[in-house]
Image: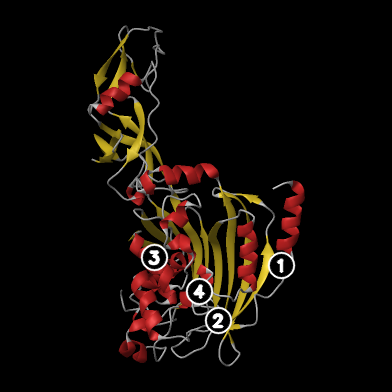
Amino acid sequence: MTPAETSAFEAKIRAYVGREMGPPKRGNDDVNLAMIRHWAEVTGDENPLYTDAEFAAASSRKGIIAPPTMLGIWAMEGYPMAQGHTGKVDVQRELHNIFEAHGFTGVLGTNTITEFHRELRPGDQVISHTVIDNISAPKKTARGHGYFIETVTRFTDQHGQDVGRQVFRTLRFMPSAESVAANQAQSGGDAKLKAPTRIQSPRGHDNAWWWEAIDQGRLLIQRCKRCGTLRHPPRPMCGECQSLEWDSIESSLEGEVYSYTEVSYPKFPGYPDPLLCGLIQLKEGTRLVANIVGCAPEAVHVGMKVRGKVERVDDATVLPNFYPA
Amino acid sequence: MNRTTRTFGSVTLGEKLPPLKIDVTAGLIVGGALASRDFTPVHHDKAAAQATGLPDIFMNILTSNGLMGRYVTDWTGPEAALKSIEVKLGAPNVPGMVMTITGEVTAKDDAAGTVIVSVSGDNNVWGTHMAGKVCVALPKES
């Protein structure tokens, strides 16, 4: 869009801010056991208050209640509105149509904040009162360039009493051409999604030999050929006698925890959780950074005896791991 | 599900909930979308999802919200009462992924008898799918 087109578009969408989506809307179905059961089945929710009449009757609730997370579901417009099969277009649909007509074809619910003021029971009516509360400034997101639309819905019951409130934020975005092409190219998109492997070790002139030994299941320690001093990580020159001549010995993999930390945030796909990184003092005298595995984070302590094992941790990676000895 | 309910007094700040693994299948995504009356094509039509730049259909926020609520009430037991849920979505959940949900008690309000559980749902391919806070009221005594 040109700057002039963008400002015309923004004027159009901003005119919707503060507008009610339409008259209060009573859910097409009042709270009922069938929809409750469908929801509980799919979410795997075995809470007996939702589906076990006998248990629910004997509980503090004195009968079945709907899962509170269904609050916004009762008044959802459903299939005809989503598919555009209806002549009826509510204000929210109208706004979304403007986004679509301007190339913002992507849609993604990104946030909800839901408050539950009263539990709902079979037979209750749910009436929604929705206002388009806010449209953000244009944003660049991981999915593409777009705008966040925020609606606020107040829910009432057949007595006009308040039962809850939901803030719902939706991203309307222009899908980036690259990601669309990439996904459509993958043989109809049927390529299996794979969990990532760990970040691969950087292998250069001075350290590739060490990683290659790890690939073969051996943990080596570099040794100065002139003075016999061991060193790690691998490097060209002896820090004691400056000799460039070296060979290596194989570690016994026995050692103790010199120091450690738990990486608790963020979590990395492809890495274990909990993720414990240790500085291991090997019996031979050098230290090595490696994961501590096979025990709870609380059990690890400085000085803990450990025993290493060089093992495959994913399709592309072999690493030394250290277990409590 | 355990049918006994945790009491407010038995919950400690910093307490961690047992993790729950969810296999993200096309069935769960479509089933969740339909059970929440969300017929937006990206949640059941792969071509529509791909036209928005994703490899496959993806889970709707109402299902994520439902799983988050279920995760916390699985732990509290049935006599607890959900008071609020805040969910923020990150990376989409698409078929073939495994989401691991974890949680920790991060606040206790003695006057209200409520606790806040901070919940994270991380999938094994793209990382954090959802993060949020669930406020739940617990009985004073069982």
Of circles 4 and 3, which is in front? 4
Q: Chain of mark 4?
A: A
Q: Which mark is residue A17?
A: 1
**Residue B120 percent across, percent down from the top left:** 45, 58
Q: Chain of mark 3?
A: B
**Residue A167 percent across, percent down from the top left:** 59, 69
From the image, which quarter does the C terminus of chain A lie in? top left
Residue B142 appears in the figure: no
Q: Mark 4 is on which residue type?
A: Pro
According to the picture, the residue beneath numbered tag 3 turns out to be: B30
Does dot 1 land on a helix, a strand or a loop? loop
Q: CA distance from mark 1 to mark 4?
A: 25 Å
- For marks 2 and 4, the one nearer the N-term is 4
Q: Mark 2 is on which residue type?
A: His
Of circles 1 and 2, which is in front? 1
Of circles 1 and 4, which is in front? 4
Compare residues A212 and A93 and report the one nearer the observer: A93
Within the image, what quadrant is residue B64 found in? bottom left
Q: Chain of mark 2?
A: A
Q: CA distance from mark 1 to mark 2?
A: 26 Å
Q: Mark 3 is on which residue type?
A: Val
Q: Which mark is residue A80?
A: 4
